[in-house]
Amino acid sequence: MAKARRKVKADPPPSSATSRHRLPATDHPLRYVFHQRPRCPDPDCRSGDLRIYRSKRHPDGAIERHVECRECGRRFILVVE
Ligand SMILES: [Zn+2]
């Protein structure tokens, strides 16, 4: 009975293991990123109590949100680039 020949896979070149430019988790300490909440554009209101009633994503990744201020009822469009 003939023995099946074992295929020996060659090790992949070391460059393929480092093709991703992603740093190991230890090199990425978690950072705090502070971002101000959107506010009503009415200078007499400036409330942060807003309601999103419509949301749309653009092909470039930007998000367009139609927002209504719960405080004064003013509506505006918020674009998150
Ligand atoms: Zn308002």
Image (cartoon, grey):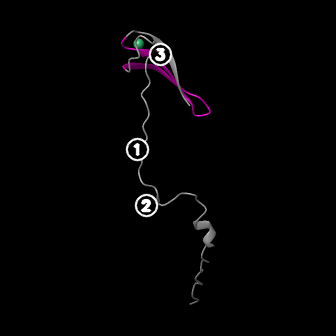
At label 3, which amino acid type do we have?
A: Pro
Mark 2 vs ligand 1: CB below 8 Å: no
Residue 56 forms part of the magenta stretch? yes
Image quarter of the C terminus: top right
Mark 3 lies on residue: 41
Residue 10 forms part of the magenta stretch? no
Residue 26 is tagged as 2
Secondary structure of the residue carrying tag 2 is: helix
Residue extent of the magenta highlight:
49-71
Mark 1 lies on residue: 32
Q: CA distance from mark 1 to mark 2?
A: 16 Å
Q: Are marks 3 and 2 in contact (CB under 8 Å)?
A: no
Mark 1 vs ligand 1: CB below 8 Å: no
Residue 12 in percent (x, y) is at 61, 72
At label 1, which amino acid type do we have?
A: Tyr
Q: Quadrant of residue 17?
A: bottom right
Against 16, residue 79 (above or below) is: above
Residue 26 in percent (x, y) is at 43, 60
- Upstream in the sequence, badge 3 or badge 2? 2
Residue 64 is tagged as none
Callout count: 3
Secondary structure of the residue carrying tag 1 is: loop
